[in-house]
Amino acid sequence: MRFLYQRGKVYNEVYHDQPIKPRYGYPIPEQIKAIRNLQRQDIRLGITRNQSFVKAARLMADYEDDFRYDRRVSRHKPAYDSFSDIELRGYFGWRTGYKNGEDVPGGSYAEVYMNELLCGIGVVNAMDGYEKLRELQRRQGSELPTIEKMIIDYAVCYELPKELISGSEMFHDDRNIILLQDCGCGYDDCDKLTARFKAMLEVSKVQELAEGAPYPEHIDKLAELMCRCLDKVQAYSLEKRKKSFLEEVCGKPSVWPYAMLGGAVVDAEQKGHGYIYEVNPVRTFYGGENWSVRRMSLTEKAGELMKGFVQAVYLSFMNVAEDAAGYIDEKNNKTVSSWMKKVIEETCRNYIQEIKLREERRVKIDFSRLDTIREKSAAIRDRLIVDEDEHISSEAVESVSCDDVVDNNDLGIISTLTELERRVVKAVLEGEDTGFVREEGQMLSIVVDSINEKLYDYFGDSILFDDGTLQIYEDYIEEVRTMIGI
């Protein structure tokens, strides 16, 4: 009791027991207290921070907490020892909510959970860990700027299939380098030509050509010409120059030290010196006490060199294709040497001439004559059908006039095929290689289209199709054999 004097009056005040409000987040669970003691013990024993974290994380793998910490936590290279008791309890509350479907931004909490997954904690196997890391990337990727690299490193450490990471945006330049170096890939593969063309545009930063501007009707031809010119320039530079053109653009393969899982608090298993993990033809990781990577990288001048090349090919092509003398703007070609211009212009002229010859060789069918041709063909067929023991009389043979035979050859069946087209059909029937088409200076896809077009009216269908290998539909094989005479 105490007495108070106020405004001439005396008051007495009596104290009573009052309940004490619990502190926010307290009491701290015993499991959290246990790992705090464990960490202090590890420090005394000289155990590394990473090893201590892994030990504690294994003990807390199944721990759950309903506490939700209402403040954002941000730490550098966070682990359990980065947090105060209340913050650490907040982490386990956040992790419990995350596993139950809550998507509260985690800050450093998300990074600690990533470290647990990288250590294989809370996962069934390596693949399960990979899938959970990808899920974490989808849900908390904005909180984890390094997670893509960590996932790649995780796949390398745990020998997961390279297909899981080879499409990563981190290897975008690798894919462009591989496409640029794929010389002699064949010019009848439209998908490969398009991919190489896009790689040139990405490296050169001349993206407007990808949309065909300003001549969209020429974009397919331009893609093929770009690939032909690149191969010619590379072949010439390999023979005549000290450093090839692609070496100036893509550099040489070199080995560099690599910080595997660098920045993460992990205790990853070391790989022996014989461990090799090839992501793609231009990037390979090597294990050992210290990791290394053999890789290629675009040079500092890659964009400038490729831009000059792309512009030179484009301007040369349009100059020839449009027959516009003086179209080439020399000031846009300062980065292109004179020898390269000569190779490009020669390749361009030859390619345009090839296109013109290809168009001239195309056979045009007069469809207005098909009804008459069919009638005469049917008459000839009826005259030639005889019984097994009979022979065609001389009168029957004489009744088939020369004009009728010529008209039958005009039918658009096998007689309309060129010698090269007959060879292609025969090669497909016999399962032989069709490489002779390229040797003839032709594109296999164009020859195939021509064959299908000429025989379409007879069969009512395309007979040739490409399903990885060029084939004839089974329904037409015997009839085509009879026509071709094999």
Image (cartoon, grey):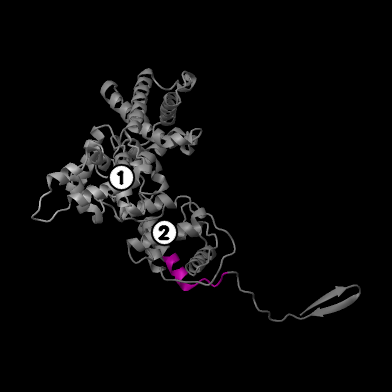
Mark 2, Cα crowd under 10 Å, few <14 / some 14-19 / many 20+, is many
Q: Amino acid at mark 2?
A: Leu
Image x and y of residue 458, in percent: 30, 49
Left/right placement of residue 445 relative to residue 107 reads: left
The circle on residue 177 is none
Q: Nearer the viewer, mark 1 or mark 2?
A: 1
* Pointer 2 residue: 133
Residue 450 falls within the magenta-colored stretch: no
Please identify the dominant SS of the magenta region: helix
Name the outermost residue toward the front: 395
Image x and y of residue 369, in percent: 35, 42
The circle on residue 373 is 1
Please give the name of the residue rendered at 42% of the width and 51% of the height, measured from the top-left corner.
148
Up the image or down, 443 lies above or below 483; here it is: above
Residue 304 location, quadrant: top left
Up the image or down, 473 lies above or below 247; here it is: below
**Magenta span of residues:** 25-37
Image x and y of residue 217, in percent: 46, 36
Name the outermost residue toward the right: 8
